[in-house]
Image (tube, helix red, strand yellow):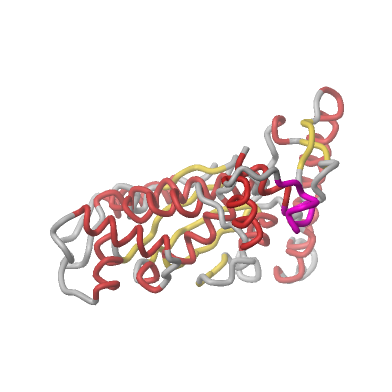
Amino acid sequence: MPLTPDQLAEIAAARSTPRQTLRAVSDGMEAHLYHAHPVLDHGFIRVIDYMGDDAAIVQAARVSYGAGTKHVQNDEGLIRYLMRHWHSTPFEMCEVKLHVKLPVFVARQWIRHRTANVNEYSARYSILDREFYIPAPEQLAAQSVVNNQGRGEVLTGEESARVLEMLKSDANRAYDHYEAMLSQDGQQGLARELARMNLPANIYTQWYWKVDLHNLFHFLRLRADEHAQYEIRVYAEAIAACVKDWVPLAYAAFEDYRMGGVTLSAKAIAVLKRRLAGEAVTQETSGMSKGEWRELVEVWG
């Protein structure tokens, strides 16, 4: 289960005792605070704390007092300008701290984003639970024949059942051995920091992850993209839903300029200008590589 009864009771108690504050408050994020959003079969994300809101971005950009301008459209215009021109520091004034439960192999991919503060559950100190990520059948796919780090066709029938059985049996056998090595029946038992090395990469871990909004947007641009691996993408999508409620003006600009926009090279812009002038441009006459040309063609459809 994603949360134990004790954890649910702790969350309910925290949400039932609101306190008055003079700090900036986002009503949208307050609705998410402490609440656990399920992800995958045993995982979740939940907001532990946050700092700032849309007004904090504007305030930092103008180095002003209070909530900044009284006109929302002016604030929105400034935020869009900052996003459009790749300004970063005003967005760094907002931060969020998340509690995340995720499979170890997803954590290893996630930790490549080195612009956050992380504190992970210690398997040297505590014993990990018998919880493993087992993909839904529709997520079991063959290796892509065109992308070395992607998936191809979904496995079906006996092949799908065979793979699922191996994933389940291997994970449980490894955990059985983990428990046996920790056992002190008739012996001292192996140290936890050693026994953990026998656990599979689909076992769940947990961490606190604190990041500023600028670097969070970079994370979401890569990991909420349709080309990202499914198992990390669903976490990014759950986080994005919280961010959208937290800083709606900034998130709208992010969707427009980052998620929905593209960056064109000087060669690509030159090709587009030539096409607009009525010239028939090909890959051979563009000065672009086949890969660059293919990506440009995908942009203009």
Q: Residue at x 38, y 49 (%)?
A: 252
User: Which stretch appears magenta?
Assistant: 281-292
In magenta stretch: residue 94: no
Q: Which residue is farthest bottom?
A: 63
**Residue 169 position within the rendered picture, expressed as x and y whole percent measured from the top left:** 81, 41
In the displayed structure, would residue 158 be above or below residue 168? above
Residue 253 left/right relative to 159: left
**Residue 205 position within the rendered picture, expressed as x and y whole percent measured from the top left:** 61, 57
Residue 35 left/right relative to 193: left
Depth check: 81 or 157 in front? 81
Depth check: 263 or 93 in front? 263
In magenta stretch: residue 285: yes
Q: Residue at x 35, y 66 (%)?
A: 94
Depth check: 186 or 123 in front? 123
**Residue 47 position within the rendered picture, expressed as x and y whole percent measured from the top left:** 40, 56
Pick the quarter of the image with the C terminus: top right
